[in-house]
Amino acid sequence: MERQKKQKTYTPKEALIKAAAYCAYQERTQQEVRTKLYTYGLEPDDVEEIIVRLGQEKMLDEERYAQAYVRGKYGLKKWGRRKITQGLKAKGISDYCIKQGLKEIDYDVYEENLKQLLEKKNATEKEKNPFARRQKLTYYLVSKGYENDLVQDAIKSLGV
């Protein structure tokens, strides 16, 4: 017979302490925290009150979350603006916070990332037909979230 794991319920006070630790570990969105609080068996009013309290205590800050997200995705994963924006929208971040987050992008580093990705992909691309090759390189960079005009300029400057 399969035993079902009993979900522990917490009082709002206990949940606040757990949620604060959850937020301290890494930046979180309001939606992530809200989902977590509901797993603690809290009422909607208590959940919203805890979210407001975490915001007041600067434990939960969506603008800061957006900035950290942008730094990670463009710095480490070398994503383009479009893919980063889509990712933040999917997490329910406001347009204002997304705009603030995108300010973290240094244009020179952004262009350098694009060039590095293009050179790396160009070196490994097996397609011989120049038209098909350009198409594949373009598709790859656009799928990484880079703007089409920047991709075309980079491909022209590489002379592909």
Image: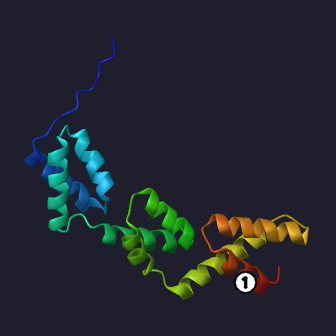
Front in this rendered view, residue 1 or 48 = 48
Q: Quadrant of residue 149?
A: bottom right
Q: Amino acid at mark 1?
A: Asp
Front in this rendered view, residue 49 or 24 = 49
| Quadrant in which the N terminus appears | top left
Residue displayed at 19% across by 37% down? 41
| SS assignment at label 1 | helix
Percent x, y for residue 93?
Answer: 38, 63
Left-right relation of 140 to 47: right
Percent x, y for residue 156?
Answer: 78, 83
| Quadrant in which the C terminus appears | bottom right
Q: Quadrant of residue 83?
A: bottom right
Left-right relation of 131 to 36: right
Give the colouring mode of the picture: rainbow
Please tell me whether residue 80 is drawn above or below residue 4 in the rendered image: below
Percent x, y for residue 14?
Answer: 10, 46
Q: Which residue is mark 1?
A: 153
Please tell me whether residue 62 is drawn above or below residue 110 in the rendered image: above
Q: Residue furthest top?
A: 1
Q: Residue furthest right?
A: 129
Residue 79 in view here: no
Residue displayed at 72% across by 83% down? 153
Residue displayed at 27% across by 52% down? 33
Front in this rendered view, residue 89 or 151 = 89
